[in-house]
C-alpha cells in the first residue's frame, strides 16, 4: 500500500510508550566519561582543492575508545575568529564522508561545516568512508545493526553515538567557530545520530533530524521488512530466544529516549510513504521531543528520500531565522543529568 | 552477468559502423537555421539566496521553435567582465534543473555555470523541472524516447538538441563570460546532449560527456532491456513493421554521428557494468570521436552511476589543466559544414 | 495482501465525498463548446478485409481542438438504415485501436461498433494506435497521467474526454445506426472515459464501465503504488508543493463527479483484488451513479483483468435485455446543465 | 540481455541434431492405434448464443484412452455441405477453450473452426477449460511438463498429442467441412501440438505453428530459466540422476522430430526476444521441417507474445492465398511410415 | 508489512466459524471404509546403509484406492519387540521422502520413525519422492491444490489424508513398535495432514502439527497471495463462478474441522510473520482443537521456516515428557462418530 | 540464462592463471606461527541430550589471535581410544554451528565429527552461531567479504582460515580419534575453508570441498552479481581506485592458490547452474588441485544447493572406500614449505 502507516492525524498525536532502561542516563554518563578519558586530540590538515571560496580540512579526532574518527571541515574562506555558526552533519547508513567538496552548501551559506565519517561504514554507496571500527562483534548478520547487539556495552551504536558527541566537541575547538552556535543535522541514520547527540549534549544551538532512523525499534520491526531495520528481524529469526535481550539492548539507543532528553530547538522532517524509516517511528521521537520550539516538515508523497535538496534549503532558511532571532531567544532549558 | 558487454580490450577498439543518413548535416543545418530564426532573447533574473559566494540567476532563452527554455546560471561572486571560463551542463533523463543551489561545484571552482532544464522533463526524480515542451506527439509510449519518433522532424530530441545549442549561445551573451572558453558537460542523457552539441557547435573549448546515453541505438536495444533504451524496444514490440523507420529517425540523433563531427578536446567516462548505457555504446562514440585529444575515465566495477562525485572532481582537474595549457593550445580544427 | 481494500459490505455502502470544483459544469460546457466549434467532419473508408459478415471502416472525426481522431467502425453486413443499435468503445491505458478485425463480438451480435483510438497512446501493448496528440505538456513524468497536469485546461484527459464525446456524435452520423440506441463501454481507462462521456452526453442508451480507472484519485494514490495512478504519486514526489494544485486539476476529471451527473442505465464491473483500479475507487463512482437502474458485476478473486471475455458476454446479454425491454422503458431523466 | 539467443543469421542456418529414439515411429503408430481402438464418437450440441453470423457447437470426441475431449466448433452461418475449409486450433499452456464466442475470426473469415480444449489444463489464465485428464502421474512437480515423465508411455503429452490427432479426425466428420482442406494452428503449446499433429497426420492442408513450444528440450532447458521449460529443470534439480531418462522420454515428444516428418505447407512465427520459447528452439523445428513450402514470420523486438493479432491476420491471408492457388497445388509428398 | 496478520492477543482468542459440511463425518467414514477395503499389505525391505545405529527400511503400504504408498522406516538398532514409541511424519508441500538417512533425529532419540511420501509430489525440492498418484484430475492449475477440486470425492487431499491414516496403521504392524504410543507430526502440508489424521484416527498418543497448512482456506486466500494457498485464488480467477463450489469442496479438508474432532494431546507451532501459512489460519485450528492438553510454540520474528531444527528438539523434549508422565496420564477422551 | 558459465567440456580443462602473491607461503607460515603462539587449549563439555547413540560435546579452542572458537563434537557412543576416523566440517556463509543434534550423519556413520562455528557469523540463517570475532574492520560494506579487506593481515578470512587449521588440531587431541585419519569438508564457504585448510595442513586424510566459495575472485566478480561475491563488487563500486589493492589482498585467500598446495585425496562437487559459486570458479580450484587422486561430482541442473543430502551420502561412501583401501594407500606426497 501507498500510505501503509497510521493516517496523518493519528501520527500527529502518536506518542507511544517506548521501552527505556532504568539505567539509561547512567549508561550514557559512563559511556561519555569513558570516551572523554581519551584526549580529543583534534588534527586538521588543509586540503589542496581548486575551490575558491571554501577552505577544506581533513579533520581527525578521538571518538569512543580513543579510536580516530575522520571528518571533513569546510569553512567559508576568510572567516574571522569566533564568527561562524557551525553545523555538524552525520551520514546515512552505509555511506561515508566521501569528498570534502561534495558538501558545499553550508559553507557557501556562511557556516562552518563538519561532516563526520561513520566508523566502519562508507562502502555501501557514494564516495567512500575512511574510518575504521576497531571493535569486533559477537555472532552477527550482514550489516551494522546487529554488531555487538548481545549487550549495550558492545553495541555498535554505542561507539557511533559517542563519536557523534565528540564531533561537536571537535568543531568547537576551531578558532573561526562560535562555540555557542553549533547545530547538528543528518538524514536517516544521520538523523538518528542527531537525536542521540541532541539528548547527550547540552547547549546545542539547534537540532535538525531528517527522516531519522533508529527510533522505536519494536514498532519499526513489526511494521516493515526493509533494511536496515529488517537486519534486526533477520537476527531474531535465527536467535529466536533473544527477543527480549535484543530489544533491551536497543532501548539504550532508541532515538525516542534521546528525544525525551533533548532541549535545543528542532526541525524534523518526515515522509509519509517512507518504508525505510516509517512515519510513526519518526513521530514517536518528534512527539516526545522535549522542546516546544520544534517543527516538522511533512513530505506526504515521498518515500525515504523525503525532501531531498529542497529540505536542505528549508533547513538553511529555518536555521538562518533562528540565528536572526537569537539575540532575543530564550536559552535552552538546562537539563540536569545525575 | 556482471560484465555483460564486450571485454575491455575489445571495447577499446570497438568502432562499429552506425547508420548515418545522407542528409544528416543538411537536417541539422536546417534545424538550427529554423531555431535561430527566433530571437535568442536571453533574460536573467537574480535569485535571492542565502549564498555568500555565488550569484544565481534564473535564465530563460528561446530554444527550438522559439519555445522558452529555463536554466540556472551560477556565477562566482564579483567576477570581472570576460574573465570567466564557462560550463554548460545538461541533465539526465527524467530530471529537471531543480534548485540553483544544488549545483555549486563549478561556480566554487571559478566557472560560470549554466544548468539547462530539459523541456517537458523534470518530474521523474530530484527537485523538478520548469520547462514545457509545447510540441505534441504521434502514438507513443510512456517516456520521452518515442515522442514524435515517426520522423526526424517531429522527434523529441530534435528540439532538445537544438535547445542545447542555444544554451551555449545563451551563456556566451553574459558579460562575465569569456565566450572563447565555453565547455559543455552532462551525464547520461546529459552526456548524449553534450555529444550532439559537440557535433553542432564550433569553437567549444572542451566537451565532457559522462556515461553518455543516446549512442548506437541498434546495439543498445539489442543488448539490454532497461529503460530508457528499452522504451524503443517496447515501441517496436507494438509497431512491429516500423523497425527500419524508427532506426532511420534515430540515426539523425545518434551520438556516434555527432562524435564523428566533434572537434573540441574531450573527456569521456564509462562504467563497465553499466546496464543503462552499456560500455560498447559509449565506446562507439568515443572511438569515433574526431579529436585525438580525448580521454576516457573507466569505472570497471560501477553501474550507471559511474564515477559520481569523484568524476566531477576529475572533470574540474582536467579542465583546469586544459585551461592552464591553453596559451599554447592548437586551436580546434575547423569543420566545414555545407 | 490478497484483499487489500475495504471488505465487500463496506464497499457496497462506500460513498465518499470527492473533491468537486465549483465550476465543474461550466468547465465542461466550455470545453465541449470549444470542441464543437470545429466541424465534426466524419470520414469513413471501407477496409478490404477477408471478413464475410462484418464491414469495417476506417473512421476519422474531429475531436478536441479539431484534432483528427481515428476509430474503427464494424457494421454487421447488410444492415438496414436506422436499424442498428450501436456501441462506442474506449480503449485501456497504453493501448490503441489495433486492427478492426480484433473487435468482432459486437458486430457479430448485431451492433454497430465504433472503437475509438486514444490520442497519443497505442504504443504500450497490443496492435498499436494511430492518433496523434498535437498538444504539448509542461514538465511531466513518463506516461500520460501528468501531461499538462499544471491546470485543467491543459490536462491530457480534457482532450481525451472531449474526443470521447465526439465519438458518440460520430457514430450517430451513420445511416445504419439508430441514434437513439447508442451505448458506450470500455475497460479500465476505457471505463473512465465511459463515465466521463456518460456524465457529458444526454440520451445515451446505456453505459457499461468495466473496472473503471480515473475515479477518486486521492484514495487511489493513497492506497496503491501501481501505475498508472502511481504516475501521479511520482510526480508529487518531485513537485512536493503541488499536491493541492494537482488534485484540483484532477477533480475536473474524476469519474465520481461524472457518475453523479450520469443518467443512462449502467452496468459496472469491479474486481476485488484489483491493484490497478482498486475496488473502493470503482464503488466511489458506482455508489454515486445517478440512476437507480444500475448494476455491478463483482469478480471477487480477480485482479485488474476482472471478468475478461466472460464479462463481455454479460454485457451483450444485459444490453440485449435492455433493448428487449425498451419499448416500455422510461426515458432517461433529463439533466439540466446551466 | 535483450537478444539472448543466437544472432538471426545463425538462427537461419541452425539445424541441430536433436535426440530421436529409434522406435519413435513405432511408438506413435502404436499410440495412435491404441487411441483409435476407441470409437471417435463425436457429439455436437448447438449453443444458444446471441451471434447472428456464427453457429457455435459444443463438440465432444474421444481422445487418448477414449477420454472425452471438449472443443468448440464455430461455423459460418448457412454453410453448404462440404463447402468449408477448416481450421483446428490448439491452446497455449495453462489455458482452456474458454467461450466459443472468444474465437470469432476464422468463422468470420469463412472457415469451420474447431478449438480444442487441452486435457487437465484451463485453470491458469483466461476463461477456463472443461476437459479432465483421467490419468495420474508419478512424482511430479507443479505444472504439466513433468506429469508421467518417468517414461514415454505415461507422459502427459502422449495423451495430448493423440487428442490433437483425433481433433482433426473429428472436424472431418462435419458435413459442412471439406475434409481435404483441414489446416491446423496454435501458439506456444498450441504450436507444439500443431507440429506433433503435423508429423502424425497425413494430408493436412496447411500447418501454422506460432512461436511453438515443445521443441529441442535440451537446448531450451540449457538456455532459459523460465517456465514451462524450467519445470523440467526443477524436476532434474531434484531427480539428479534422471537426466538421461528424462530427455529420452522427451525425445518422443520433441517438435523437431515431428517437423522432420511433416509434409504440409507451413507458416511459422518466431519472436527474437522470446524468453519462453527461445528462437533457436523454434528454428530447430523450422529448419528441419520437411517441406520446402514453408515460411517463417520474424518478430524481432517481441517476446513470447510474438505477432499477436496481426499474425492471425497474416495467417488468414497466407491460408487464403494457399487456397486460392490450390487448384494448381502439388499434393503433399506422401510419407511412408512403417 | 512485517506483522501482516492479527496482533498476537487477537490471535490467541481467534476462533472463527469455518464452513463445515453436514456430511463431513459421513464423508470421511465412507472414505476410510473404501480405503480399508484394500488390504494394507505392508512390505519392508531393509536398506544397506553405512549407518551403525539405525536400521532403515523401505516400507510400502496400500493407501487410498489401494495405491501403493512409500515410506522410510528408521528403527534404533537392536530394539526389543513392543518397546518403541513411534512417530509418523508427513512431508511439506512439493517435497518427497528423500533419503532414509536424512531423517535420523527420532531414531537417535529412541523412536521408531516412519516418514511417509506424499503421492505424486516430491519433485519440487529436496531429494525426491517415489510415490505415484494414479488418479487424474479435471481442469486444474499447476500444483496440487486444485487437482480434482471439482468435488470432494475427487479432490487430491482426500487421497493424501487417507494415505496418512494408513501410515499410522502401517507403523502399528511393526513388531518393535508399541502400538499404543504412536504419535504424528509434520510441518506445513505435513502439519495439515497431521491435523487431518488427528481428527480421523483414535488413540493417537500425541499430535505435533508444525506451522500447519490446509486450515481456514477462505481466510488464507483472502489474506495472502503466496503459493500454495494462492493456487486456489488463481483457479477462482479463471473459474469465476465456482467460488462456492470450491470452498464447499475444501470444507471437507479443512484442518479446523479436523481439529474440532482431534483428541490426542497436541503441540503446535506458529510463526507470526509466516506469509505461507498465516498465523490466523494456524490459530483457527489451534483454538478449535478438542483437547485442553494442547500447547503452541510461538516464533514471533519468523516466516514459514518457523522454529526449524530448534522446534524439532522442542518436540522431542515435549514428547519425552508426555511419555514420562504417561503412566499417570488420563486416556484420551473417546470421540463417537456416527 | 540457465547455463551461464562455460560449457562443461571447457570447464573440465579450465585452468586459469590466478594472481598469487610472491610471499603467499611466507604470509601463511607467519600467520599460523602467530596463531600457534597461543595455546590451543581445547575444552569439551558433554551435552545433556536425549540422543541414545551419539555423545555430543561443546568444544572450545583457541583460533587466530587466541580467540575462543566454538564447535560441536559428535562421537559415536562407546568408541574405543584411537578408533575413530574423524571429520572436521566448516559452515556456509552466514550460518552458525546451530545445534549439535543437527549434524548426526557422520557420527551415525561411525566418525568423530567436529562442526566448527565461523567467527562473527551465524545470524543469517539456521539455528545460530556462538562465536565472536573480536577484530574490527576498516570501512566495509554489509557482510563479511570486505571486513579488513584493506590488507591481508587484517582480512577477515585470515582469521577464519587459521581457525580452520586449529580445528583440525583440536580434533586430533581427542582420545577416541585416530589422528592419522582426519578429513575435512564443508559446502560453499565451508568448501572454501576446506580448500584453505587443505593447503595449509599436512597429512590430512581426505578433503571434500562441496560447491566451494572463495575461489578465483576476479572471475567470480566479473561473471555474477549475486552475494556474497558481489559484496566485493559493491565495495569496488565505492572504492573505485582500490581495485588492484583489493584483489591483491584476496589473492592471499584464493582457494585456487591453496588447491595448488593441497596434497590429500579430494572429492569436489560442482553445480552447473550455480549462480553463487559459478562452476568455472570451482573448476579453477579443482583443475589446479595438486593430487591426481581427485574426483568431482557434477550436478548439471542444480544451482548452489548442488547435490544436497545425496551428496553427503556420496561423501560418506567415497570416504568409506578411501578408508577401506587405506592399508595399501600411498602416503600423501609431502610438501615442503620454506
Image: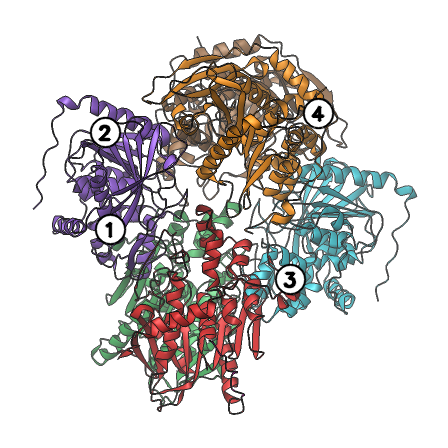
Chain colours: A orange, B purple, C red, D green, E cyan, F brown
Q: Residues within 10 Å of mark 2 (few under 14, many from 20)?
A: many
- Tell which of E45 and D155 is nearer to you: D155
Query: Mark 3 falls within which chain?
Result: C
Q: Quadrant of residue B263?
A: top left
Left or right of F161, for residue F132: right
Name the residue rendered at 17%, 42% in the picture: B200
Residue A51, how many percent across, how many down? 33, 23
Instruction: State the CA–CA distance, disc 1 to disc 2.
Output: 27 Å
- Of circles 3 and 1, the one toward us is 1
Query: Mark 4 falls within which chain?
Result: A
Residue E248, how many percent across, how many down? 68, 67
Q: Which residues are magenta?
A: C329-338
Q: Which residue is mark 4?
A: A24
Q: Which residue is mark 1?
A: B159
Left or right of C157, for residue B76: left
Q: Which residue is mark 2?
A: B85
Amino acid at each position: 500500500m501507498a500510505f501503509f502507516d497510521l493516517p496523518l492525524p493519528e501520527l500527529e498525536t502518536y506518542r507511544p510508550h517506548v521501552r527505556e532502561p532504568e539505567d539509561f542516563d547512567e549508561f550514557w554518563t559512563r559511556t561519555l566519561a569513558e570516551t572523554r578519558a581519551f584526549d580529543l586530540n583534534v588534527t586538521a590538515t588543509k586540503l589542496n582543492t581548486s575551490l575558491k571560496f571554501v577552505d577544506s580540512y581533513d579533520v581527525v579526532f578521538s571518538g569512543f575508545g580513543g579510536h580516530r574518527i575522520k571528518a571533513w571541515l569546510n569553512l567559508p574562506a576568510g572567516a574571522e575568529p569566533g564568527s561562524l555558526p557551525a553545523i555538524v552533519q552525520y551520514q546515512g547508513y552505509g555511506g561515508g564522508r566521501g569528498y570534502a567538496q561534495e558538501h558545499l552548501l553550508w559553507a557557501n551559506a556562511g557556516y562552518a561545516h563538519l561532516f563526520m565519517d561513520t566508523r566502519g561504514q562508507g562502502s555501501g554507496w557514494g564516495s567512500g568512508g575512511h574510518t575504521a571500527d576497531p571493535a569486533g562483534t559477537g555472532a552477527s548478520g550482514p550489516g551494522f545493526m546487529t554488531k555487538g547487539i548481545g549487550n549495550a556495552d558492545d553495541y555498535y551504536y554505542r561507539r557511533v553515538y559517542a563519536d557523534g558527541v565528540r564531533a561537536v566537541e571537535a568543531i568547537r575547538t576551531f578558532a573561526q567557530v562560535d562555540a555557542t552556535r553549533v547545530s547538528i543535522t543528518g538524514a536517516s541514520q544521520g538523523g538518528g545520530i542527531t537525536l542521540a547527540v541532541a539528548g547527550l549534549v547540552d547547549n546545542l544551538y539547534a537540532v535538525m533530524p531528517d527522516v531519522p532512523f533508529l527510533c522505536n525499534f519494536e514498532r519499526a520491526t513489526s511494521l516493515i521488512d526493509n533494511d536496515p531495520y529488517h537486519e534486526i528481524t533477520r537476527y531474531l529469526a535465527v536467535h529466536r530466544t533473544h527477543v527480549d535481550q535484543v530489544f533491551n539492548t536497543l532501548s539504550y539507543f532508541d532515538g525516542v529516549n534521546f528525544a525525551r532528553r533533548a532541549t535545543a530547538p528542532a526541525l524534523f522532517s518526515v515522509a509519509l510513504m517512507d518504508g525505510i524509516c516509517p512515519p510513526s517511528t519518526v513521530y514517536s521521537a518528534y512527539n516526545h521531543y522535549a522542546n516546544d520550539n520544534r517543527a516538522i516538515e511533512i513530505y506526504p508523497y515521498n518515500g525515504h528520500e523525503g525532501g531531498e535538496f529542497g529540505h536542505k534549503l528549508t533547513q538553511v532558511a529555518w536555521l538562518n531565522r533562528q540565528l536572526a532571532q537569537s539575540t532575543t531567544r530564550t536559552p535552552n532549558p538546562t537539563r540536569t543529568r545525575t
